[in-house]
Amino acid sequence: MRGLAIIVLMLAGAVAMLAGPQWLDPLSLSPLQRDILLELRLPRVLFAALIGAMLGLSGSVYQLTLKNPLADSFTTGAASSSALGAVLAIALGVPGYWVSVCAFATGMAGLVLVYRMSQHRGRINPVTMILAGVVMNIIASAVISFAKYYFEDSLNAIVYWLMGGIFLVSWDRLALCAGLLALTYLFLSRRAVALNLLALDEASAQSLGVNVQRLRASAFVLSTLLVAVAVSFSGIIGFVGLIVPHVARSLFGSDMNNNLFYSAVMGSGLLVVSDAVSRVVIPGGAELPVGIITAVVGGGFFFYLLHTRRGSLWNG
């Protein structure tokens, strides 16, 4: 089944490389079309695949470690705190590359603040962490609204960035995302059994030798790092981290060894397809922000799952 999922993802990526304002025929490529395919669309499709996998994987870990089916990068404050830095950088006219640096810096600062607020006597309270994340989201949204109101000249750029998109693609960013995703997935997959025990019962996990606090803290930090990097490069792309883990859990069960893999693969596929649709849905070469596509597709599919699998959506 995993091999089939990889094949489907590769086929989706191949089709996405050919899609755009000008559809490419792989059997008769001109030199210009070959350059477009290899230098523009190939890195963009790879970037979309990596960003989607990072968001899907982080959502799976959030929902497990916090034991909340609504936990994702928004409810934990990771996405909003990252967006805050990017919006302020855009409003102040910071050059494009440094927008990502500012987003990453504020995302990690938000992580530290939420993490410290959720600690009590050396232990992390998942409920307090969710509440701290929601408060962080509210504060960041308020500052972002102020920036949109006060810096009118930058309003269009801010709004477009907040909608999310696969832009500013480069091979060094691809390498950074690929390395971070690989290391995080390897770390989490090797601890899949401990994560399964953590999902069932903390006391039992502790009695079986699992350091619950250390495992939860490390998983949360790595997930937030994935979100901060993804948001700093692509803006806010909603619904991937929320919907994909639910779909993976509903279709393939609650075993974290499977859920981690399918959350990453399905998140990757969802964003690759959504990015391809965003390039062709508006005639004339205009591009729709991919965050709109993921919200529409993810929301509709989530309603379908609620209707057909409402009894097994969380427990598998």
Image: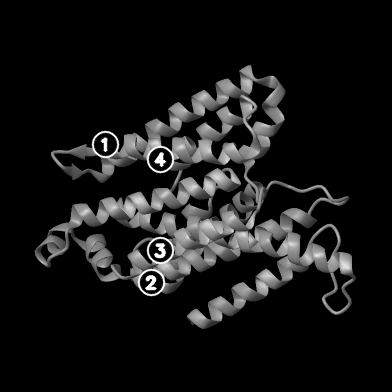
**x then y, percent, for residue 112:** 33, 38
Query: Type of residue at label 1?
Result: Arg
**x then y, percent, for residue 48:** 61, 58
* SS type, badge 1: helix
Which label sits on residue 183?
3
Q: Earlier in the sequence, mark 2 or mark 3?
A: 3
* SS type, badge 3: helix
Q: Is residue 85 above or below residue 164?
A: above
In the visual, does 276 lie left or right of 190?
A: right
Q: Residue furthest left?
A: 207
Q: Residue furthest top?
A: 150
**x then y, percent, for residue 6:** 55, 77
* SS type, badge 2: loop
Q: Is residue 2 above or below residue 199?
A: below
Viewer-nearest of labels 1 and 2? Answer: 1
Q: For the residues marked 4 and 1, what is the alpha-carbon distance in whole angstroms? A: 12 Å
Q: For the residues marked 3 and 1, what is the alpha-carbon distance in whole angstroms? A: 25 Å
Which label sits on residue 108?
4
Which label sits on residue 259?
none
Q: Earlier in the sequence, mark 4 or mark 3?
A: 4
Query: Type of residue at label 3?
Result: Leu
To which residue does mark 1 refer? Answer: 116
Query: Type of residue at label 4?
Result: Met
Whether label 3 touches label 1, CB < 8 Å: no
Which label sits on residue 253?
2
